[in-house]
Every structure is written in C-alpha cells, then in structure tokens.
Amino acid sequence: MTSVDILRTPDELAEAERYTAHNYHPLPVVITEGEGAWVTDVDGRRYLDFLAGYSALNFGHRHPGLIAAAHAQLDRITLTSRAFVHDQFAEFCRSLAELCGKDLVLPMNTGAEAVETAIKVSRKWGYQVKGVPDGQAEIIVAADNFHGRTTTIVSFSTDPDAKADFGPYTPGFVVVPYGDEAALREAITPNTVAVLMEPIQGEAGVLVPPAGYFAAVRALCDEHNVLMVADEIQSGLGRTGRTFAIEHEGVVPDMYVLGKALGGGIVPVSAVAADRDVLGVLKPGEHGSTFGGNPLACAVGGEVVRLLATGEFQRRSAELGEHLHARLNALIGHGVVAVRGRGLWAGVDIDPALLTGRQACERLAERGVLAKDTHGSTIRLAPPLVVTREEIDHAFEQLAAILA
Ligand SMILES: Cc1ncc(COP(=O)(O)O)c(C=O)c1O
C-alpha cells in the first residue's frame, strides 16, 4: 500500500456506526476475508485472530471440511422445520449424543436459546420428577456468570451493564460466589432443581475454579437430587485441551449446554445433551424452534462432531496451550499481573498502570493481532485451535512489545 491509497476502513466504520444500535464497541478493524487463524481487512492488512469468535471459530476460519459440508448441504436442502424429519437430523443428534456420552440431544440455534432450554428442562424435571411444588423451582448460578442475553438470563447476571434497566426480572435464581463450596451447600433448598455454571468463566476473565470445586458441586447435586448443568458454550468443544472443560475436574454433569463452535463458525448451532430421565420430560408442543436442528445446521454440526471425534483439536489445544501459557507466564512481572486458563484459552491481567484491556487490544490490532478485553485490564486470548506454534510466538511477541 502506498501513501496515496485511500483507506476504506474509516468510511466502513462510520457507516456501520451510523446504521446500527451501539450495543457493541468494536475495534476499528473491518474484516473482509478469513482463512485458518488469519483474517484480512478491507485495506489488505492481515491479522492473527486471537479471539476466534469467542470460541465459535475453534476450527479456524473456513475449515475446508466444514465448508465442504456446508456447500454440499446448500445444494440439497437447507430448511424443513421440525414439522418434518430430514435426513441429516438423526446422524447429527446420534453423533453429538455419543460425543457427550448422553442418551439424547435437543438442538437449538444460539447459546442463549440452549441455556433457556436447560432452564426450562431443569424446571420441568423439578416439578415432574423431583416433586418440587408448582412455581417454586430454584436454580443456583454463580456470581460473575455469563450465559447470554435473554431477559430471563440477564435476570441472574451480576454484571450491571448486562442487567440494569432490563427488568422486571425473572425470579427463581439464587446467586452464589463462584468456587465457594460452603456457599453452594448453604444455598441448596428442597426446591433447588439445578446448579447452572460455566466450568471456566469466560466473560469474567477466564476464571478457573479452585481445584476440587466441581467435584464438590457434583457431590452436593447427588446428595440433594439436583441437576448439575455445565454451560460449555465457550469452554467446550476442544477449547481447553479436552472435549469439555469439565473433564479437567473429573466429573460428568447431568446436562451439557453447547453452542458457538458447534456451528463451525458457519451457522448458529446450539444444543443441550442429557440422559432420557432428564430430557425425556419434554413432550411435543412444549418447546421448540423454527430453525433448531435445520438441515444446514445438522450437516455442519455433524462435521464438527466428526472433527472432534478424531481428538486432534483437543490434542493441539493441550500441547499448544502449554506453550502459550509458558510464554505468557514469563511476562508476569513484565507488564502482566496474572495469567489464567487452560489449553488455548488465556485470561491475561495487564498491569493497570500500563494499559486498560481496551488499550492493549487496540495496540495489538495495530500490530496485527486481534484480541478482546473482558473487564478492566484483562484481555482474553483464544486463537483458533488450528493456530501454529509459530503463529502463537508471533502473537506473543506483539504482546510483549506493547508491554515493553
Ligand atoms: C458461557 C456462555 N454461555 C452462553 C453464551 C451465549 O451464547 P450466544 O451469544 O450464542 O447466545 C455465551 C456467549 O458468549 C457464553 O460464553
């Protein structure tokens, strides 16, 4: 590019601002193409994508197998509604149930819809199976959670930005501090139907719970006949070096809530997975979605499950994640205060005296690395699992440079 070239980015940014609600504050980058771990902007600049669509792009941009599955399906049929069965449905549901080690799955579209599904199923299970009095079901959640944006879900958010002025709020949720076993024990009542938590809290800054916490959650749920529901929408499907982040804790939840990477970065695909005694409480007409489980979603989601069944992505995340964390940990005391996470997922607390998270992400973008701040001076790194060691080193060098 020469100095006489006119950049398209400023105009594109201004147009986007002009015609949209300001519910996001994007970095000043206008992307036009992507491949693997890289994206290119409208002015031809290339960036390493270290956000990966908040883990929706675990397999990278335009993974060839996923694109081929989408193309093949686009040429056959894309939508039937669940009023009819289509030929991609059974195989997707069977393979996903098998990946989860559960009897049944219920496909939806966005993560928030899958969380809503988990809430509805837990409540119905509570009334029909556990025998909780009508209208009394309680679900325990963690402080600093992020489970989506619906009015019910923000009702139990502790983030004022996500919650304020969106009331009246849905009752039936009890918030306990994340990682505090005693507080959870205290909060359980005979009306508790579920404990809904993220195995690692992504939006909160990639917070890893204390060792043994989820084993204690599992034991308390068993003791009190309460469903343990793991929101693996951001943490699952290879991100932490295992298929599910909860595997690191050595426990199996009663229900998995999945989304993001399940759609391969191509279509929104989400699902819950549980055994028949739980998901079987739903009868025809009680829950659904026009687009949930559509042929295109199932074709892409089925290919995602096949990719995960090879174990390659979990292995890459574990091995390269060790490298990423070793390098990041070496920055502690050199502009970094703390590093958390597992696999190719890291929350990095930058010294607030140096930069806010937003400033750090702006400087990184100027150096060709895209990342996202969470709160304060924390940034989140979550590259696609196809990233190479050399690309990690390149991104790391840019981070070290902005902190120097
Ligand atoms: C843990 C978790 N749950 C739920 C959601 C909501 O997913 P969606 O934005 O697809 O509705 C997210 C999104 O960031 C998430 O990280």
Image (cartoon, grey):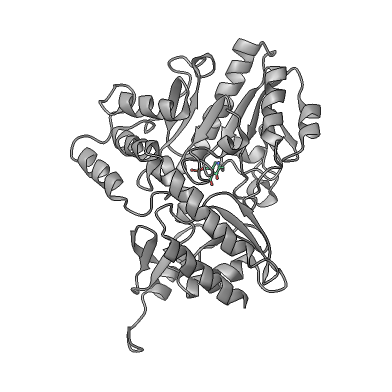
Q: Residue furthest left?
A: 75
Does residue 175 sit above or below 48 in this rendering? above
User: x%, y% of residue 316?
Assistant: 44, 50
Residue 18 at what x, y percent from top left? Answer: 46, 65
Identify the image quadrant of the N terminus. bottom left
The C terminus: image quadrant: bottom right
Residue 190: name its quadrant: top right
Residue at 26% x, 43% y is 70
Left or right: 66 in relation to 17: left
Residue 203 on image: x %, y %: 60, 50
Residue found at x 53% / y 14%: 277
Taking depth in this image into account, of 297 and 392 the one nearest to the observer is 392
Q: How many marks?
A: 0
Q: Nearer the viewer, residue 120 or 59?
A: 59
- On the question of residue 381 being in view, the answer is no
Q: Quadrant of residue 87?
A: top left
Instruction: Compare residues 21 and 197 and report the one nearer the observer.
Output: 197
Query: Can residue 184 be seen at all in this image of the molecule?
Result: yes
In the depicted structure, whether residue 288 falls above or below residue 232: above
The percent coordinates of residue 334 (x first, y second) are 67, 72
